[in-house]
Image (cartoon, helix red, strand yellow):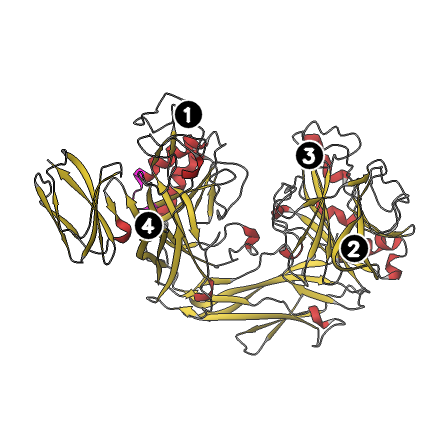
Amino acid sequence: MNYSQRFITCCGMILLSGSAMSQNAYHLFEVKNNPDAKGINPRSLNIERDDVAEGSGWRALKWDTLSKGYSLEDSIPFAFQFNGSGVKKFRATKNGSVYFGSGVAVPMDFLISSLPDARIAPGSVVVGGVMAKGSNDRVLVKTVGQSPNRQHWIKFQSFTVGADTANKYGTYSYNAVVLEENGSSIHIVRMGWGSEYAWYADSVPVKLKQANGIVMGPFETYAVAELSDLLNEIPLQSKSFIDNSFVTFAVGKKKTLDASLSTGYGLRPAGTQYVKSGLGIDLAVNGIFTVHGNTPSTDYWLNVQVNGESPQAYPLTFVNFTDYRSALVSKNIQRDMQPGDRARIKVWLTLNGGGADDNASNDTLPMIFDYVAQVGSGVAKTPVLVEAYTATWCSQCPAANQILDSLQAKFSGKVIFVSHHINDNMNNANAPAALDSMPFIVIDRKTTIGDPKLYASAVEAAISKANHSATVAVKDLVFNPKTRKVTGKLELQSLDALDKGGIRFGVMLKEKTVRGLGAGWDQRVEFNLTRDSQSIFFGKNKTLVGYYHNRVVWSTDGGKHGSQIAGLSGVMKSGETLSYTFGLTVPDTMLSLGMPTAADFGPTGAIYSRFKPADLSVVGYVASDFGMGISELKNLGVYGAELLAAAEQPIWDFAMGNDLLVQKEEILLYPNPASDRVRILSASAIKQVLVMDVMGRGVLTLGAVDELDLAEFSSGTYLVQVKTNTGVSTSRLVVQ
């Protein structure tokens, strides 16, 4: 169907639904369903999983009378107008509607399969196609965003689909009515549906096909009807928000001649994008062209202005309408670009012959396209960052960890491995991803691999392509044992042109090679997979053995996606440096849990304790908002920014007997091995000397001495920790 046919058919449908068009109280503003199944929620304010229930700000409404199908009356937390009148209260119904009226006389105990429907109470917004029947059926509410642009979400969750569905096959459906503070628009969001039984999964979109819209009165209905075909192109919607779809009903009379240019809710916001320098480089600009007026005119021009220069105008003859009233506009602008050159592009609409349409406020795209030219070859061979995801309840994770162990040994120095625990007692709240299925790994924040059999080939491929445009180093590392604070500096050196404002710095505190008492804080305890055979508890009690984990991230600086340095702007040239000062806290999480303390490795999982600390390191990385951005409000909250560089610096290495964190100068023990006496040679004044056994237990504490008498020492290996005016250093001493 061409655009004219779509427009006439759809408008005819709405006219037939009643006197809605004559009243002009609402008009269907946009239908959004990204063809790549990457649609997002209205205005990108809600980026949570669709099935989030009570908690995290969500509150369940209680039923007033389930027989008639109404919830208790609830409040809208901001000023909102429905059909031109202010409303403060609403009720939800068990058959999928939000009711703004004051009476509850009309029963809502039937399945809404199409609109208009004379049984629906006037003053209702309908998602339809659902019927609350079970104990898990609920209506949840939550307000998202900041004033004056808040949204109030009314979510119908876990409803049985259709009166004939017993829900025994796990059928689920999530829909929402969203009220907008700014402008009083109403969004109807298709969030998710699915079933373990194929017939229900395939039939859910059919059941919901005609049941969305607004009911103003018995003869005045704004029905989505035929338009809802556009919302059913995805046969199965998951519980992730990234495949949602929705329609928007906007308040007010349509203009006779009005169109807009917007980023669209299905297009990812663009940040700085890098292009390879050269002559005639294509710089792409795109947006959503939408006709709002009664006149279906496409007689518009696209105006493009680069860096404030004279604008160029292009007729929109290339528009191909694939959506109701909307079309994707994409245009390549050719420009010569040298390394470090920047092009900032502004885009807007004008009518053919110049000038604005009836509503000029929506003609300019509210986004500047920003391009920076690079040499683009990538000369640095920096390590690849591999982030693994695991959890206590993951039965496959121990075997996946064995694969990671072998890869870590094979690719030593070429790959940095870390592990994020999610949804368990070791949960890392700043893990950048949150997926249901585990195990999986993410390589350089851009490639996700879920099959452990593919780990090796994927990592090897990443190593072969790891030519980066920057290097990063961890410097000035300092540790305060009393406060357990780790501070330092992450230094970036650019090897190509980089946008300063888009650079993000992140630091992770990584724990490695911890064995000891198992308490269910890590992978499931399996005798055949445990690495803790040297523990005195091995094989004696299943709840106390098999404790082993490696690469675990315990503390982060920079949040989920790295932190930007405030106030930075402009383009970095090759050779320039930037530094980010970070702070981490070494957790002491297990000491308060009453774990046994007689084990050879001290309290279970103790990161820093009076027994052996875990081996620790700092992993620093630098990423960029290249392409789409990586913050929670950009790029759908998922990985999207290619890593520029990563580096790892050990803090405590028990095997080497060194506290590398604060090794400011050389500490020399002479002679070593020794039998009678040993001298301590230091460039700085010695303040304290602590001698420990190999388990980290104190043997002898002395003040400002530069020599040790070994007469009372048994033969063996000891650790000598020396505190000076500039720091602390630990060296291994062999007593004969």
Which stretch appears magenta?
A: 409-415
Horizontal side, residue 672 vs residue 76: left or right: left
Q: Name the secondary structure under disc 4.
A: loop
Q: Residue 448: x and y, percent?
A: 47, 43
Q: Residue 580: x and y, percent?
A: 39, 61
Real-space Cα distance between discs 1 and 3? 37 Å
Real-space Cα distance between discs 1 and 4? 35 Å
Hey, what amino acid is under mark 1? Glu
Which residue is tagged 2? Answer: 5
Real-space Cα distance between discs 3 and 4? 57 Å
Location of residue 693 by image quarter: top left
**Residue 481 got which mark?**
4
In depth, the one of 146 and 564 nearer the eye is: 146
Q: Name the secondary structure under disc 3.
A: helix
Horizontal side, residue 695 vs residue 173: left or right: left
Hey, what amino acid is under mark 4? Pro
- Is residue 97 visible to us here? yes
Q: Name the secondary structure under disc 2.
A: helix
**Residue 201 got which mark?**
3
Q: Residue at x 42, y 48 (%)?
A: 555
Real-space Cα distance between discs 2 and 3? 31 Å
> Is residue 413 part of the magenta span, yes or no?
yes
Horizontal side, residue 118 vs residue 49: left or right: right
